[in-house]
Image (cartoon, rainbow, N blue to C red):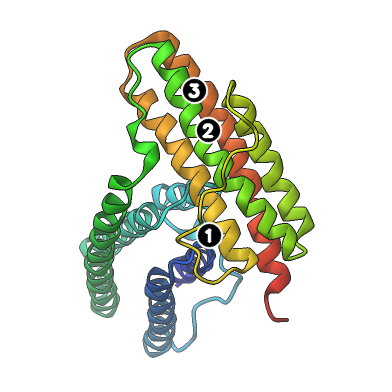
Amino acid sequence: MAMEEAALQRYSGLAVHMEMLGERRIAGTFLGLIEEERDHIEEIARRSRDLTGSLPLARAADPRDLPTETARLWDEAAVSATLTSYSALGVAVESEMQVFAFYSYIIAHSDDATVRATAEWLAGQALAHAAMLRKERRRAYHRDSAERARDPMKTLDAASLADFERQSRRLESHAAAVHRGIAARLAALAEDAASATIAEIADREESEAAGLSANQPRVPLAGVQVVTPPLLLREALRQAEQLHNAYLRLAGRTRDEAVLAATQEAAARTMKSLSAIAAALRSVVTRSAPC
């Protein structure tokens, strides 16, 4: 039961994170899994009472109650500022398969028919969850692929350091223009701290876009229909993620040592931007949450 309670905690965290990213459909998927985990806990308690005459030992759930590899995947996801819907669903699929393997081990080694029957039921539930999550992950992949096709950041493909510097200036310029516009709109909404954070990031991006004017035209925020601080910060986070991922993709492809060093340095810088925006978003969401 401890493992089911730990999984419930993990899915709760993912549901909150997906809500922060505006991924309401996927947040709903995780909320549905939370309810099923609660049903599992109740069923395990009932079967334990029938088998032993008592409930399992009550104690606070600990995420470390999950299998070691599963706990590692969740821990990495929890601290990732670049956690996307696709990667979150991937972690959840892997988690369910690890849970299935755990219950399969119990089925193979338990001499108690009731324990085996409970493990078989839970293993079947884990497989069903994994199948559902894989379907959601495919949807997320196709949607993300369509977004990448329209992504101005996807064209970073430098064969030399000179190419990288030229292309990087263009990408940094675009990101700076978007972030400068978001900072202005946050300031207009009296979100001074968040505005200052985004403006500082735009300053760094403009500095990297050496030789380009700091007074660049602001890029329309077409993806933000309702202008609220959380939505503006999610758009800022999305832009920073695009820039960061463009550098990571090039770092994974290039065979030029100078380009590799430059992309790694750029990725480290954009990672700081991601962390700063994620912290600002958490602060705004926490402050605006109903008590």
Label 2 crowd bin: few (<14), some (14–19), many (20+), radius 10 Å: many
Label 3 crowd bin: few (<14), some (14–19), many (20+), radius 10 Å: some
Residue 290: which quarter of the image? bottom right
Return the residue at label 2. Answer: 172
**Residue type, label 2:** Glu
Q: In this view, does 219 lie to the left or right of 68?
A: right
Return the residue at label 1. Answer: 63
Out of 80 and 195, give the one closest to the viewer.
Answer: 195
Q: How far apart are marks 1 and 3 (CA)?
A: 33 Å
* Residue drawn 64% across the image and 64% down it: 229
Label located before the other in sequence (1 or 2): 1
Position above or below: 234 against 164: below
- Marks 1 and 2: which is nearer the front? 2
Question: SS for tag 3?
Answer: helix
Label located before the other in sequence (3 or 2): 2
Q: Is residue 27 left or right of residue 17?
A: left
Q: How far apart are marks 1 and 2 (CA)?
A: 39 Å
Image quarter in which the N terminus is found: bottom left
- Marks 1 and 3: which is nearer the front? 3
- Where residue 149 sits: x, y (%)? 28, 46
Residue 92: which quarter of the image? bottom left
Question: SS for tag 2?
Answer: helix
Image quarter in which the C terminus is found: bottom right
Question: SS for tag 1?
Answer: helix
- Marks 3 and 2: which is nearer the front? 2
- Where residue 71 sits: x, y (%)? 46, 52
The reply to whether the C-beta atoms of the residues labelled 3 and 2 are less than 8 Å apart is: no
- Where residue 239 sits: x, y (%)? 50, 46
